Image (cartoon, grey):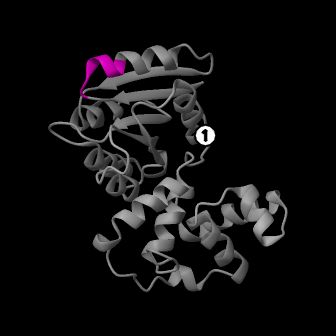
Amino acid sequence: MTRVFLVDDQALVRAGLRMVIDSQPDMLVVGEAEDGRDALERLAVTTADVVLMHVRMPRLDGVAATRVLIERDGDAAPRVIVLTTFDLDEYVFPALRAGASGFLLKNADPEELLAAIRAVSCGDAIVAPTATRRLLERVASTLPAPVDDSRLAALSDRERAILLEVARGLSNAEIAAALHIAEATVKTYLGRLRAKLEVRDRVQLVIFAYDSGLVAPGR
């Protein structure tokens, strides 16, 4: 059973999300909050696997709440899916950098929402590497200069090649085809990359590729 926690300042939105999620035999809404501050207090005493976090809220927004939640709870923190009304919302990238596993538009189909929750609960980032790259291209002018990250130097040529393809938004199957290796091999390398780079999921791999200078915006 995947335990889901809802954070949104609109009660009607929370009610709609609860209805969709509780209709599934493998999911259960375990709590709600109307802003980031309320969410942090309730999540301190509520066990959740996935948090659906609206990005723009009063008192404490979804970006700050995500950052505090992951810093506070570390590896035990639930996965966060950021919900936003606007495609390419400038608030989304800081939330991803703070540790969110991906984002969805609030008008996403119920099937897309449920698939995202299932993917994130299994430790995957939701289908957003390509969307994440579009965000990075949009905010390129505000990104800090690449840092000299020793973790990048520690990667093998094959690991670096796979990281590059992940940053380009390719799926596992597309990476396997591009590099002429088995898809299972790609999955093995992705596990090694997450361990070596100390990141939680695929979206964080994309952000690392940009932060380290492996990928330059616009290329």
Residue found at x 76% / y 56%: 173
Q: Quadrant of residue 174?
A: bottom right
Identify the element where label 1 is drawn. Answer: helix
Q: Which residue is mark 1?
A: 119
> Which residue shows up at 51% across the image and 72% down it?
209
User: What x and y, as percent, mark residue 30?
Assistant: 43, 21
Q: Quadrant of residue 47?
A: top left
Res. 59 image quadrant: top left
Drawn side of residue 39 relative to residue 126, left or right: left
Res 184 seen here: yes
Residue 13 lies, in percent from the top left, at 33, 22
Vertical relation: 81 (above or below) 148: above
Q: The residue under label 1 is which amino acid type?
A: Ala
Considering the whole magenta stretch, tell me its main secondary structure.
helix
Seen in the picture, residue 131 relative to 38 is either above or below; the reply is below
* Residue 200 shows up from this direction: no
